[in-house]
Every structure is written in structure tokens, then in C-alpha cells.
Amino acid sequence: MKPTDFARALSTYLSLYLPGQRNVSPNTIQSYRDTFKLLLTYCRGVRQLAIEHLTLGDLDDQLVIGFLTWLEEERHNTKSTRNQRLACLHAFYRYLQIEDPAELLGYQKILAIPMKKTPLPLVNHLSVDTLGLILAQPDRRTRQGRRDATLLAVLYDSGARVQELVDLRVRDVRLDPPPILSLTGKGRKTRQVPLMSPTAALLKQYLDECHLGPNGTQDDPLFANRQRHKLTSKGVAYILNKYAACARAVSPIVPENVTPHVFRHTKAMHLLQAGVNLIYIRDLLGHVDIATTEIYARADTELKRHALEKAYTNLISPDLPTWTEDADLLTWLTRL
């Protein structure tokens, strides 16, 4: 059977354009793939369209709007998830604008479908005391405890995304002064982040104990399980949850939901509270746009309070009449 124009375009987009010209990560390609799997499921199950005969002409703006509505109403996706799926479709149709300009009007109708407004995301982060309590939980008398203590320290100190952490190889660590960690983030972009002395000391002990270094193990995963396979994102989350639960048993200040990304938020907030410029925080976290980093400045109510206190002019009197001075409560309320 002859492939349709949609099948050819989608195959070229996912197999050649994204990894070849855009150099996006496999995780990003999987996200795009999952969006189109859902779209095809909608076309077959709801619109009764045969996938093998589906063309670009079938995928008009009304079908895409119906797909987005189906995500929210039938699959109960949040507005944020709906917007993420729409962003994947927008990227595909921006690609098609150049590859197939004859159908530009139809593609622009899809590109004109707006994102839905969503509330600003909460920046969950830990206080210094809470973080210290979690980091103190691994039992450093055991080999696994020493590995976990090193892993949590690197996760916080580097501000790494969890995927960046699990992708680390031994060659990505430089302990010669100044100690540096090379992280490969979104878009396969590499950035170097400094490591503080305590974290560098933990890493050195860990590498020595595991016999990792310039001895033919440079391409080994930095953090591995007992089979020497690199840890997964879920594995790191499990380790963190285990020690967060231990810390919660010691003190109720530890919140219920402590994820690896909370550690990343925590690092950013601690740097901001220490007076570090947002530009440096952006570079440490690997953000492309400074606007992404500004969420931390907007979220830090303590910094806002200090700034307002410095600029505060005391014009408001705290004195209020008390109802005991007047037996008539209605008269007191009127005066108030």
C-alpha cells in the first residue's frame, strides 16, 4: 500500500528532522511520538478514520480542536497537559509550513489554535533545615548508604534534572580544582556546573571506593545499581522518597511530596536567597530563557517581604478602638 502524505511527513519529522536537524534528545522525541499516538487513537476511535488512509487534509483545525477537547473531557487531562500536546502539534505544523507551503493556510489555522491559560506553577522547595535533615538520612557506614549520600548531594549541589543525573558518566566529573560536573540537558546541550568542596570530597571517596576513574571506566555510569547498570529516573525518585520518609519520621517539617525536581527548585531558591544573580542561576540550571528562571524570584515571598520592609514608610497606626469602651456594639462597629 502506498504511504499517505501524512505518514511520510510524520516519519521524516520524527526520524530525520528532530534528531538530525534539531538535535533534540530521545526523551523529547518520545514526547512528540506519544502526542501523535494519542492523536491517531482519537482519529480511529472517535472520528472513525482509518489510520492507514489518513492524510494531511484530514487533519484540519476542527479535528485538532476536537482532539484537544477529547483530551480534557474524556481522558481528563489538565490544561497544562493539553497545552503540551498542542505545543507538539504546533511544532509539527511549523515544520510543514516550510516543507509543504502549498497548504500554508490550513497549517496556519492549526497554528492559530491558542493555548489555554493556566495558573502559574507552584515552586515547591525545601528549607535549609529540611534539606539538611534529608541529606543526613543515608547510613554512611554502608556502601549503599555512601552511594546514596553522594547521589543526593550531587543532585542538590548541581541543580541537575533527574535525567541529567542518571545520564552522568565517570568522565563527566572533574575533581581537580576547581571541581566541575558536565551535564547534558535538553537539546543535548552540555553545561558545566561547579561543585562545592563537601560534594567534591564525597564524590572522590565514592569514585575511589567503586574503583572508577582513569582506568578504563570513564564511560561507566556515575551512579549505578548492583548490576552496574545506570540508575533510572524512577530509581532516583525511589531513593529520594525513601530518605524523605525517614526524615519525616524524625520531624514533621518534611513535606509529603519530595521529588528530584524539588531538589532542583531548592537549589535555585537557596541561591536566590543568598543574593546570587538570576543570570548565574539560569546558567546553572540550563534554562534557555531568563524568564523561566524568574519564576523563583516571583515565588520567594521571603525576599519580597524583606524588600517591602526596606521600602516601608510607617503611615498606618495600629491603634483601634475596643468595643469595651462603648456598651453599644453597633456604635463601636460604626466607629471601626
Image (cartoon, rainbow, N blue to C red):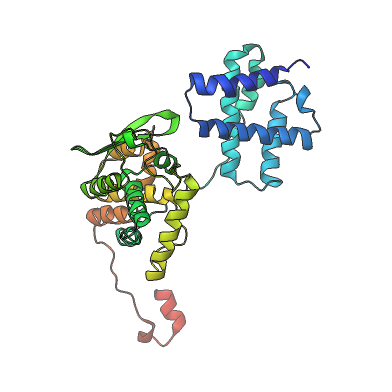
The percent coordinates of residue 175 (x first, y second) are 23, 39
Query: In terms of depth relative to the viewer, which is nearer, 293 or 132?
Result: 132
**Residue at image point 48% right, 27% down:** 24
Residue 235 seen in the figure: yes
| Quadrant housing the N terminus | top right
Which residue is most to the bottom? 327
Give the answer, above or below, for where 139 lies relative to 4.
below
The percent coordinates of residue 222 (x first, y second) are 36, 41
The percent coordinates of residue 110 (x first, y second) are 64, 26
**Residue at image point 35% right, 39% down:** 285
Give the answer, above or below, for where 226 lies relative to 318.
above
In the rendered structure, the answer to whether residue 218 lies left or right of residue 74 reads left
In the rendered structure, the answer to whether residue 29 lies left or right of residue 180 reads right
Query: In terms of depth relative to the viewer, which is nearer, 202 or 215?
Result: 215
The percent coordinates of residue 207 (x first, y second) are 29, 44
Which residue is most to the right? 48
**Residue at image point 41% right, 69% down:** 249
